Amino acid sequence: MRVPAKVYCVAALGMFLSGVVFAASTPLLSEFLPNQSDRLETEWIELYNPTAYPIDLRFYQIGDGHNLYPISDTGLYLPAGEYIILAQDSKRFLKYYTDFTGLIASPDHWAVLNNDGDSVRLAYLSGDIIDSVSYEAGFPDNRSWERYIAADGRSYWGGSFSPTGSTPGKPNAYFPSRSAELEVTVDPNPFSPDGDGHEDETVIRYNPPQAQSCDLVIYDIGGRKVKTFFEAAPAIPGQVVWDGRGDDGRTLAVGIYIIFGRIEGGTNMNIKKTVVIAR
């Protein structure tokens, strides 16, 4: 396990479109945690069975971008509509997630997931890939990557929105309910990026209605664009963590700044919110 650089974008910039949903006759990747920390001493991957019948996982392999290993050498059935956790070490997993009551298994061999970018792959024993996702980095504080399948059948991945940082064995908490309006919240506000360890960052959460693209940028009081989080990104809910730095990497001056969000395509609207950098 390698220590990752600090990840500021929890959903938008760290989000990957993995393509159209795969055939409903196979299990799917649903959630994974590649960079455990603190008391969690194991990586884990969650699978979901979207079919109407049990699936025997002994006919499948799991792994990273380089290696694949069998999930089980004996019958291991995942019931219809259920989840299973594949843990590098199931005992360490249960020691950390003390309220977990779902299915869990530890494959005999485990492909360690890199914190600074890798792939998670699900395959048949033949090696044919069924499902996969690539990621740039793991999230801090035991926050997992979670999957959301949109109405058009495409899959989006992002950081879990669960207060606990993950949802092993449960429906994913990546996406809140979609709003009819473009919503943006900021907390804390004001915040003080002075390096004293208290409110040095603020979390900007956004929840757009259905649309084709989304922008999230910050302007100073004079109308100059000082920070671009993303432009023309998929219009799906997410959040970014802002450390008060502009696009040039320098901490911005004390004052009032304008968060500008916009969605276009199908639905067009924008919103402005103020955020205050204090000392």
Image (spheres, helix red, strand yellow):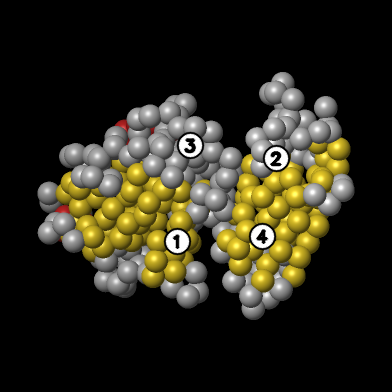
Which mark is in front, 1 or 3? Answer: 1
Q: Which label's residue is closer to the chain start, 2 or 3?
A: 3
Q: Position of residue 187 (x, y in %)?
A: 74, 43
Residue in the image at 39% along x and 56% along y: 30
Residue on which the image places disc 1: 17
Res. 275 visible in picture: yes
Which mark is in front, 2 or 1? Answer: 2
Q: Give how far apart the Cα atoms at labels 2 and 3 are.
A: 27 Å
- Left or right of 173 in this view: 82: left
Tell whether label 3 touches label 4 (CB within 8 Å): no
Kind of residue at disc 2: Gly
- The disc placed on residue 189 is none
Which mark is in front, 1 or 4? Answer: 4
| Crowd class of label 2 (few under 14; some 14 to 19; many from 20; radius 10 Å) | some
Nearer to us in this view, 169 or 183: 183
| Crowd class of label 1 (few under 14; some 14 to 19; many from 20; radius 10 Å) | some
**Badge 1 element:** strand
Which mark is in front, 4 or 3? Answer: 4
Which mark is in front, 2 or 4? Answer: 2
Q: Which label's residue is closer to the chain start, 2 or 1?
A: 1
Residue on which the image places disc 4: 215
- Left or right of 228 in this view: 10: left
Kind of residue at disc 4: Asp
Residue on which the image places disc 3: 142
Nearer to us in this view, 155 or 169: 155
